[in-house]
Image (cartoon, helix red, strand yellow):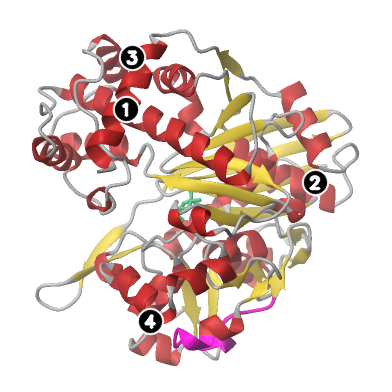
Amino acid sequence: MSCAAVDLGASSGRVILGRVGGGELTTTEVARFDNKPIRVPRGADDDRLHWDILRLYADVLAGLRRASELGPLDGIGIDSWAVDYGLLDAGGELLGNPIHYRDARTDGVLDQVRAELGARRIYATTGIQFMQINTLIQLVAARDSPALASARRLLLIPDLLCYWLTGEFGAEVTNASTTQLLDVGQRRWARELIRDAGIDEALLPRLREPGETIGVLAGSARDQLGGHATPVVAVGSHDTASAIVAVPATGTRFGYISCGTWSLVGLELAAPVLSEASRAANFTNELGVDGTTRYLRNVMGLWLLQESLRTWQSRGQQPEVVELLSGAAEAAPFRSLIDPDDPRFLAPGDMPARIAEVCRETGQPVPADRYQLVRCILESLALAYRRTLRTACELADREVDVLHIVGGGSRNELLCRWTADACGIPVVAGPVEATALGNLLVQARAVGAAGVGDLTAMRALVAATQDVHEYRPGGDIPAWDAAARRWSAIFER
Ligand code: LFR
């Protein structure tokens, strides 16, 4: 089968053409484009951070056109980052540019929602980790906005793009689970909670499972893509759901990190864990493909590095990532540590200055140069991965023998090596394009490809066809143990 995967991340998007089935899984990147948020003034002293959704749609169409020029497509599937949405009016028209989850409108709203609805109730129903980026929190922040008052439908980002391609409305369930508006046990909208949050439940469209055909290309999208009635398939439209499909694991004793702008660290389970201990540890139960649960925590991830790079570049400096990483490898170990999940790191801004501020506050040396700063970020991430994985195993009563790192971060040798050392188990790194692969596998199965019957078969195909690299724990393990204790003493007081 020949399928096109559209994978939109927080900083770039790509269209990947895949040939899948009968033992084959090959990919060609046919388009890659930037996804740059835009800050737009709003009154004299306020602004909003938006996604440029029309630019993204145009880039998606151009990529799909290129893919379809290489031969007929059997399917198209779209995944993206989670939680964000567009609002449509009664005529199906988009009401304004979707707002970025890093926009400051949700500052302080998380506590308000917890107080209004009760943290225990929200967690028992949705199983979702409390983060101010969640759709529930965004909608409460926007409760009195004119846009919401005129809206008749809310579509998550991949569902919005699929609507433009096919004319069909719906909400794919893996991504819908991240909204914190879904009943995780029932796999349906949590209507009572939604009503009690003051949100119009009629905004939310019918849910669809990954593997359902959404429709075929229609209207101007079909005209622009050569006039074919290509099926558009619901994949795990949350990028993390697709990434975990393509973890090249055998059996169940594995942990994973989907490592990109965010690091999603956790386990795949057959059912959610909704215990009080799990709520207190702020673990999430996102819905996965084929009825699975992704039991994980969001760790702030390579955002810390990306934003540091952006800060340096905005000052006219052009540090090379390769050079930064080799400098970090040579810098003194464990000089200063941060908690990657400090809420101060969420919004775009001067990351090196914020990290310096945390070091000062906690009585640690401020990184004296870029290499020390990068070392501080990567060591702190490896320690966060260790803590998160161990806590997930405790809370879910599971053991793991291997940690898979997929996504862009799997290319970062230093991070993979330090993660193996910190966690004390082998790390298997790759594939880099796990998300696109998971997207392709689910749509190929839906349109009848052979040999991709279940997750086990899909993962075996990934393992047989894609490059991975293994890192065995081997560094100074006692030093990592000591650093983990020091981290707890500083940040868990
Ligand atoms: C990763 C991801 C995470 C989600 C965050 C925000 O790209 O989808 O899973 O928590 O982005 O949407």
In contact (CB < 8 Å): disc 4 and disc 1: no
Viewer-proximal residue among 350 and 471: 471
Q: Quadrant of the C terminus?
A: top left
Tag 3 near tag 1, CB within 8 Å: no
Residues packed near mark 1 inside 10 Å, few (<14), some (14 to 19) or many (20 plus): few
First along the sequence among labels 4 and 3 = 4
Under tag 4, what secondary structure?
Answer: helix
Residue tagged by mark 2? Answer: 444
Q: Tell me where residue 380 appears, x and y as whole percent.
A: 32, 30
- In the rendered image, which residue does mark 3 sit on? 479
Find residue 485 and name its label. Answer: 1
What amino acid is found at the position of numbered circle 4 in the picture?
A: Glu
Say which of marks 4 and 2 sits in front. Answer: 4
Occupied quadrant, residue 173:
bottom right
When the figure is inspected, residue 327 is found, relative to residue 263, above or below; the finding is above
Secondary structure under the numbered disc 1 in the rendered image: helix
Pointer 4: what residue? 116
Q: Residue at x 78, y 62 (%)?
A: 212
- Mark 2 or 3, nearer chain start: 2
Q: Is residue 160 magenta?
A: no
| Magenta residue span | 195-206
- Which SS class for mark 2? helix
